[in-house]
Image (spheres, grey):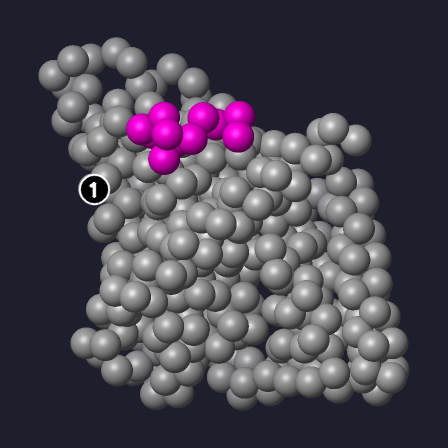
Amino acid sequence: MKSWFMIIGQLFILWIINTIGFYIVETLNLTIPGNVMGLMILFLLLVTGIIPIRWVEEAANLLIKHLAFFFIPIAVGLMALGTVFLKNGIPLIIIMGISIVLGIYLTGFVSQFVAQKKEGVKSENNNHSI
Amino acid sequence: MKIIITVFSIFITILIYLMSKIVSKKFPSPFTTPVFFSTPIIITILVLLDIQYEEYTFAKEIMTYLLGPATVALAVPLYKNREIVFKNILPVGLGLTIGSFSSILSGVLLAKVFGLSNILIASISVKSSTTPVAIEISKIIGGDPALTVAFVIITGIAGTMIGPWLMNLTKITNPLSRGLALGTIAHGQGTAEAAQEGELQGAVSGVAMGLGAIFTAFVAPIVISLIL
């Protein structure tokens, strides 16, 4: 019982931060989403210690565990849009394929290249777990 | 009638979601992940019962009420793994920036070359961001939420299947880089895959997913406004 009260209280904190995030974005006319602003606000509050992690941790874990649930009702919207995929299937496959390969390769290559440069200087540390 | 349909829609969505959780535990694969598995089943049920999408939208509003707070919650894993970023600020920062940017730009440019509609281009531009953030960015830049979810999920599945193989082929062996690439491009699914490779890979990937989403939120609107 007590832990449910706690989770609801924690959800309320997350909800408030999200609402503040949307409020800031709207007021300042920014082009980033309110929930991303909320994410950054919570991160700052945690790093500065204004909010201790135990105030939000349980509700956060619960929401993240079931994060995928929230996408399902939105994806159901495809029932009204499915034809878009059928009509543009081949270009979409090509675009996504190239873009995904490029993104993974460049992220991996650049970070490994930079990490190796750094390791040349201080050696050790990174390469033990594979 | 509206109330009955709404209650039924919520019931059926939760039921299929719980089923997908059981199935994905028994047969772990990108294809049994909740969204990929549940969505076609729910659509089929709605179509068979002759329920229009418009009639489902109220249920959708109720069920997605906590999506915003859930996105804010992503700050928690980011906070827990922040040391990894601080310790490896250059490889993480540069890898993520260049990789994420190239993914956004190549997606938008190619879509433009193929002459796709602006809604599609906007929806495709955010495909490497984690779903809740992608949906919100997409709304801002003129995309469609449902198309966006589809692109994001497909990217997660494809990235998870291609990623490890591609990195073996191109000799990207550094665990930090492997986790970073999977999280940056294939978000949540990539992170699950990275966690299979090792603890460091999983942690880096989780951080990359969060940072990549923030990066996309800042950059995608600029890229879209310049190119469209």
Quadrant for residue B228, please give it: bottom left
Q: Where the N terminus of chain B falls, by quadrant?
A: bottom right
Q: Which residue is mark 1?
A: B94
Q: Percent x, y for residue A80?
A: 64, 85
Nearest the viewer among A97 and B39 is B39
Q: With respect to residue A57, does A30 lie above or below?
A: below
Q: Percent x, y for residue B37?
A: 72, 59
Nearest the viewer among A93 and B226 is B226
Residue at (33, 37) in percent of width and height: A44
Query: Is residue B54 found inside the magenta-colored segment of the image?
Result: no
Q: Percent x, y for residue B73?
A: 50, 43
Quadrant for residue A11, please give it: top right
Query: Is residue A48 found inside the magenta-colored segment of the image?
Result: yes
Q: Percent x, y for residue B78?
A: 41, 35
Tell me if I can see residue A106 in this picture. no
Which portion, as a residue range, is magenta? A45-55
Q: Is residue B121 left or right of residue B53?
A: left
